[in-house]
Amino acid sequence: MCEYCLPLYSSAKAHDSKVCPVKAAMYCNICQVNGHSTAKCPEKDAWHYRKPRYIEQLIPPSILSHYKIDSLTKIQSEVKEHPKYIHGDPVIEIPSDSDGKNIRAFLSSNNLPCSSVKENKRTLESFAKHVGTSVEYTEATATVKRRLGSKSKKPQTPV
């Protein structure tokens, strides 16, 4: 077990920190390194004072590639003030369900081990604390319930 896994769970297999799934799941957008989350980055000043130089830096990369935008348009205004951080504290939102499928899906998408519902919840909350976020269990909407429910078979038409 390495220093990244130790706070999360005690029954993990012994491994080197170079191949740790928890370290791989934590990526910092400020430093561009794995090992800590953006919320726990020691370089908070660098995050606050980053300023875009081009308008295209404000557009998500998926939209830039979809519309094949490859130009760089300089931002003309000389704004000296930085906007306040309006997003609030980072939160992991999990739709609540009785059998823990949503928690298990989150854990597996972040390469974290899954076991019982109670242990999965404890692992999720430990992971959130480890990366500097909190977990919020929301009520499942009708859309989420429909997606998580059993697949309904479409009526087959005779050929």
Image (spheres, rainbow, N blue to C red):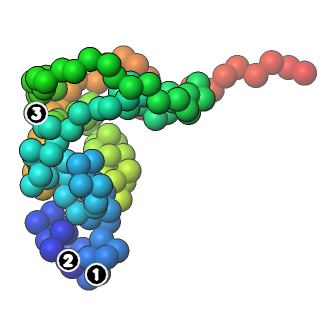
Task: Pick whichever of labels 1 and 3 is earlier in the sequence.
Answer: 1
Residue 76: horizontal and vertical position, in percent?
A: 32, 19
Task: Examine the image and state in which quarter residue 156 appears.
Answer: top right
Residue 60: horizontal and vertical position, in percent?
A: 41, 31
Residue 152: horizontal and vertical position, in percent?
A: 57, 26
C-alpha distance separating marks 1 and 3: 32 Å
Residue on which disc 3 sits = 89
Kind of residue indicated by mark 1: Asp
C-alpha distance separating marks 3 and 2: 28 Å
| Placement of 70 over or under 26, stated as above or below | above
Residue on which disc 2 sits = 2
Kind of residue indicated by mark 2: Cys
SS for tag 1?
loop
Q: Residues within 10 Å of mark 1 (few under 14, many from 20)?
A: few
Kind of residue indicated by mark 3: Asp
Residue on which disc 1 sits = 16
Mark 1 and mark 2 in contact? Answer it, CB < 8 Å: yes
Q: Is residue 116 left or right of residue 134?
A: right
Residue depicted at x 15% and y 46%: 46
Residue depicted at x 28% and y 61%: 34
Task: Pick whichever of labels 3 and 2 is earlier in the sequence.
Answer: 2
C-alpha distance separating marks 1 and 2: 6 Å
Q: Is residue 77 left or right of residue 151?
A: left
Quadrant of image for the C terminus: top right
Q: Is residue 128 left or right of residue 104?
A: left
Mark 1 and mark 3 in contact? Answer it, CB < 8 Å: no
Residue 4: horizontal and vertical position, in percent?
A: 18, 68
Task: Pick whichever of labels 1 and 2 is earlier in the sequence.
Answer: 2
